[in-house]
Amino acid sequence: MAGWLAAAAQPSARLASPAIARSNSRTAAPAGGSSRPALARPAARRAAAAVAASAGVKLAGVGSSVPEKFLTNDDLAQLVDTSDEWITTRTGIKKRHILAEGESLGDHAAAASLRALEMAGVAAEEVDLVIMATSSPDDLFGSATSVQAAIGASRAAAFDLTAACSGFVMGLVTGSQYIRAGSYKTVLVIGADALSRYIDWRDRATCILFGDGCGAVVLRAREDGDGSCGLLGMDMHSDGTGMRHLNCAFSGEGMKPLSNGHASNEGAFKNLHMNGQEVFKFAVRAVPTVIEAALQNAGMEKQQIDWLVMHQANMRIMSAAADRLGVPPERVVSNLSQYGNTSAASIPIALDEAVRRGDIKPGEVLAMAGFGAGLSWASAIVRWG
């Protein structure tokens, strides 16, 4: 297969953006003129000032990494009944990068993280927390700690966050809240997936869609103390009743100690299952709705969006969302054709490339949206730079 044997150019290290949620904390005016509320007033003001001082968060750096090997649509036509024209017109995808033998998701997560740290001018030892959004870790117990060790973030706590294609946005919001609360000053948020491990490569409905990759963003507490915040608004949702439409279920045995009178070694997962029509209908409905809710949370209008940076799943979903929001096609960040659906990695990879190209400028407003298995969907409105 020509594409599989060819080495794709490794995406260059990629850049940054600011972010975190705005707080509208207010103190009620004291009733009457009693001395008790009057005495409480200075303490309330000090508390509000402390919250405002710790609320500022910015995205200080971004990086990404994908496998060198890739599969083109023509390669897939040798596996299933399809063609380049059929895949491109229905999805917008031309190729997808796939982990080769000997490669791990953690290798690329570490590479993306180091690029993000370099762009931010931050040493790994300064990182306080690593959040790795992934549904396909190298180890059942997670990969965040492996990445933490690989990059030398010796002071950092680390954990995985599983929210499928919504994972990066949810991880961004989660990491921001740790900074907002004053618990940490530097948080590394990684979006990483290798769903090629769970694809039936004879199933045309799924094998044409997914690729592997990693992206990472460095969040830092703002030092200016003016209370400004890069994450302007957010909205997140889940609906477990829709899990039947998109899942990757455990296929091993129950009661393993009693299985056939001996301990079984099975503990695998099934291949990814997706009801494409139902997921498409869900996404077309949910994406613009969640972005509108995040805009409302930010106190902003659609017209204030400079760029849409959405989960790269299908060009028709992105086009439908852009049309409803009134964002012109040239303001929709898309690299879907070159990577396919990389799940939690798709937003940071797309963001990285757009910033590196110089498309996204400091001060511009980005509407991010992730959606997928769970079912889950989330949006964050951020100001870049």
Image: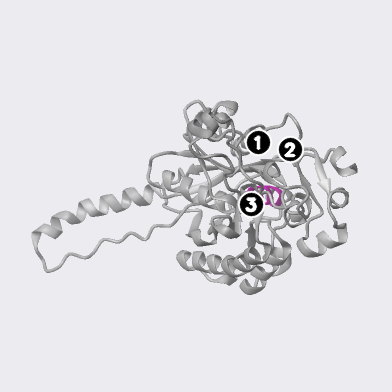
Residue 72 x, y percent position in the rendering? 84, 49
Q: Are marks 1 and 3 in contact (CB under 8 Å)?
A: no
Mark 3 → mark 2, Cα distance in angstroms: 19 Å
Label 3 belongs to which residue? 347
What's the residue at 70%, 70% (across, down)? 328
**Dot 1 crowding, Cα within 10 Å, few <14, some 14–19, many 20+:** many
Give the label on residue 99, or none.
2
Indicate whether 240 appears above or below 175: below
Look at 58% across and 33% down and name the residue there.
139
User: For this view, does 204 lie left or right of residue 327?
Assistant: right
The magenta segment: 346-354
Closer to us: 129 or 262: 262
Q: 10 Å neighbourhood of mark 3: few (<14), some, or many (≥20)?
A: many
Which mark's residue is nearer the viewer, 3 or 2? Answer: 2
Amino acid type, mark 3: Ile
First in sequence: mark 1 or mark 3? 1
Q: Main secondary structure of the magenta part?
A: helix
**Camera-side residue: 279 or 315?**
279
Q: Amino acid at mark 1?
A: Leu
Which image quarter: residue 132?
top right
Rendered image: mark on residue 105: 1
Query: Which residue is pictured at 85% across the width and 57% down the height?
Result: 82
**Which one is nearer the viewer's eye here, 138 or 340?**
138
Q: Nearer the viewer, mark 1 or mark 3?
A: 1
Q: Is residue 254 magenta?
A: no
In the rendered image of this protein, does residue 107 appear above or below residue 355? above
Find numbered disc 2 in the image and state the secondary structure of the residue it sits on: loop
Find out whether the residues at labels 3 and 2 contact each other: C-beta distance under 8 Å: no
Number of residue marks: 3
